[in-house]
Amino acid sequence: MSETETQYPPLPPDDLSRTLRLAQQDNDGKLTHIGLVGDTYTILLSGKDTNEKFCVIDMHVPPGGGPGPHRHDFEETFIVLDGDIELTFRGNKYRARAGETVNIPANAPHQFHNGSFRTARMICICAPAGNERFFMELGVPVATRTAPPPEMSEQEMGEFLKKANALAPKYRTELLKEA
């Protein structure tokens, strides 16, 4: 056995039970679109597709959209495709514009908000997977990647927040108070 073989174990064999997953823009009708906090999130790759290593979510964030402050026990990366997003990370504000990528370390308090007058679009990658299941359990199905979620009454918003707080620990997430 060579020094390299003892230093680094060989790669495992190809797992033939896993297949290629091509997430096409709505032409196969198989993508899940979730309305949540005024945004629409399309699940491109779920944990089932990646052996739970990561998930990929296409985020359509209209003006005024974005979640409140939160933190979670997984890495989150945003790739801004269109528009710009204001990020609050550990209390400091940043702006991410189209073409920029932002990584949020696990457990760090953060939030994002579209404070502009045009819709923003981001790709969100969470590692490991699981955040997509939180969105699916909490949000409401919508027809397309750009369909807005239904407006919520004050009572519905209260019920939504109660449900979000109850589900958050299951998905290694903590919802934080507005500063």
Image (cartoon, rainbow, N blue to C red):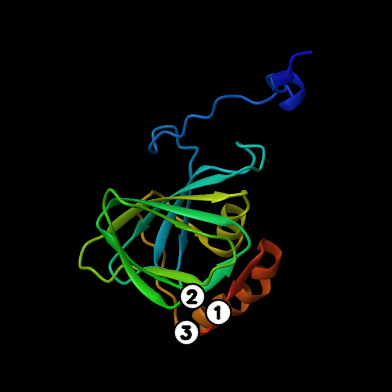
Please say if the residues under marks 3 and 1 sit with CB atoms less than 8 Å apart: yes
Residue 98 in the image: x percent, y percent?
26, 52
Location of residue 143 in the rendering, given as x and y in whole percent from the top left corner: 42, 50
Describe residue 57's horizontal placement relative to residue 159 as left or right.
left
Quadrant holding the N terminus: top right
Q: Residue at x 41, y 57 (%)?
A: 40
The residue drawn where x is 50% and y is 79% is 157
CA gap between label 3 and label 1 equals 7 Å
Q: Amino acid at mark 3?
A: Glu
The quarter of the displayed image where residue 173 is located: bottom right
Residue occupying image coordinates x 73% and y 26% = 7
Q: Nearer the viewer, residue 43 or 102?
A: 102
SS for callout 1:
loop
Residue 176's label in the rendered image is 1
For image coordinates 28% across by 48% down, the residue present is: 99
Q: CA distance from mark 3 to mark 2?
A: 6 Å
**Residue 4: where, in percent of width, then height?**
70, 20
Indicate the quadrant where residue 159 lies: bottom right
Quadrant of the frame with the C terminus: bottom left
The one nearer the camera, 89 or 14, is: 89
Q: What amino acid is found at the position of numbered circle 2 in the picture?
A: Pro
Three-letter residue code for mark 1: Leu
Q: Position of residue 111 (x, y in %)?
A: 44, 70
Q: Are marks 3 and 2 in contact (CB under 8 Å)?
A: yes
Query: Any mark on residue 178, and which?
Result: 3
- Tell me, for residue 69, which label it has, or none: 2
Q: Are marks 1 and 2 in contact (CB under 8 Å)?
A: yes
Q: Secondary structure at mark 2?
A: loop
